Image (spheres, rainbow, N blue to C red):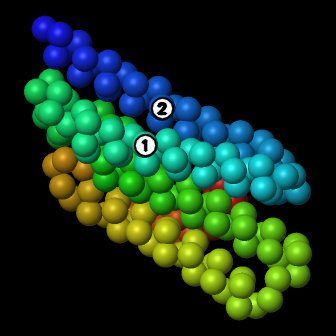
């Protein structure tokens, strides 16, 4: 039926936009370069644009597309990239990394300690929200599938555990 085709197109659009956001994060990493000595503002802009894509998808999925998608496939059977809890967490991670780049730029410019503390706190709050969102969604049938990422991997990726190469390349 037409509703099924439209629902399938919504899911396909979602997947394409998520891939675009991931490509923006990769572009941000490339702009920074191997030693993070590149254009910090341009990299931050790419991450904020990626976060905006996740926010746009959240708006569309939760408001405009929910009825058609619900008729096509149950929430727990949808692709992971189309589930609101994961989109919110990814948005927060991208924003936190953009904030971390603002911290780096502020350090380069000799910002006052109070400014640095506020910027760091903002990044920490965003990462904590993303981590909590992933924890909650991992236990809900409509969220991220259990076993998608281990607690240790999640902690290291969000900076709440031992540093890994993954963490070093994201910032």
Left or right position of 108 against 94: right
Q: Which residue corresponds to the image point at 33% horizontal and 39% vertical from the top-left?
A: 60
- Residue 63 occupies quadrant: top left
Going from the N terminus, do you reach mark 1 or mark 2 first?
2
Left or right position of 57 against 22: left
Please give the residue where the numbered disc 2 appears in the rendered image.
17
**111 vs 131, nearest the viewer:** 111
Neighbour tally class for label 1: few under 14, some 14-19, many 20 plus, Cα within 10 Å:
some
Evaluate whether residue 153 shows in this view: no
Q: Which residue corresponds to the image point at 40% horizontal and 25% vertical from the top-left?
A: 13
Q: Which residue sits furthest front?
A: 64
Please give the residue where the numbered disc 1 appears in the rendered image.
56
The correct choice, above or below, for 95 with respect to 105 in the image is above
- Work out which quarter of the rendered image holds the N terminus and state it: top left
Q: Which residue corresponds to the image point at 52% horizontal and 47% vertical from the top-left?
A: 52
Q: Distance between the residues labelled 1 and 2?
A: 9 Å
The correct choice, above or below, for 128 with respect to 111 in the image is above
Evaluate whether residue 103 shows in this view: yes
- Residue 76 occupies quadrant: top left
| Secondary structure type for disc 1 | helix
Residue 113: x and y in percent read: 76, 90
Q: Mark 1 or 2, which is nearer the eye?
A: 1
Residue 158: x and y in percent read: 52, 64
- Work out which quarter of the rendered image holds the C terminus and state it: bottom right
Residue 125: x and y in percent read: 49, 75
């Amino acid at each position: 039926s037409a509703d099924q085709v439209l629902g399938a197109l919504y899911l396909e659009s979602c997947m394409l936009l998520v891939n675009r956001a991931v490509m923006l994060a990769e572009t941000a990493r490339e702009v920074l370069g191997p030693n993070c000595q590149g254009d910090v503002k341009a990299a931050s802009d790419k991450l904020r644009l990626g976060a905006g894509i996740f926010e746009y998808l959240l708006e569309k999925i939760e408001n405009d597309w929910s009825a058609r998608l619900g008729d096509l496939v149950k929430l727990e059977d949808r692709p992971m990239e189309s589930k609101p809890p994961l989109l919110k967490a990814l948005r927060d991670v991208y924003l936190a990394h953009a904030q971390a780049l603002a911290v780096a730029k502020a350090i380069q410019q000799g910002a006052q300690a109070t400014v640095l503390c506020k910027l760091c706190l903002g990044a920490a709050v965003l990462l904590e929200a993303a981590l909590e969102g992933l924890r909650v969604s991992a236990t809900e049938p409509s969220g991220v599938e259990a076993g998608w990422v281990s607690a240790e991997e999640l902690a290291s990726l969000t900076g709440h555990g031992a540093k890994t190469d993954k963490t070093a390349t994201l910032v």
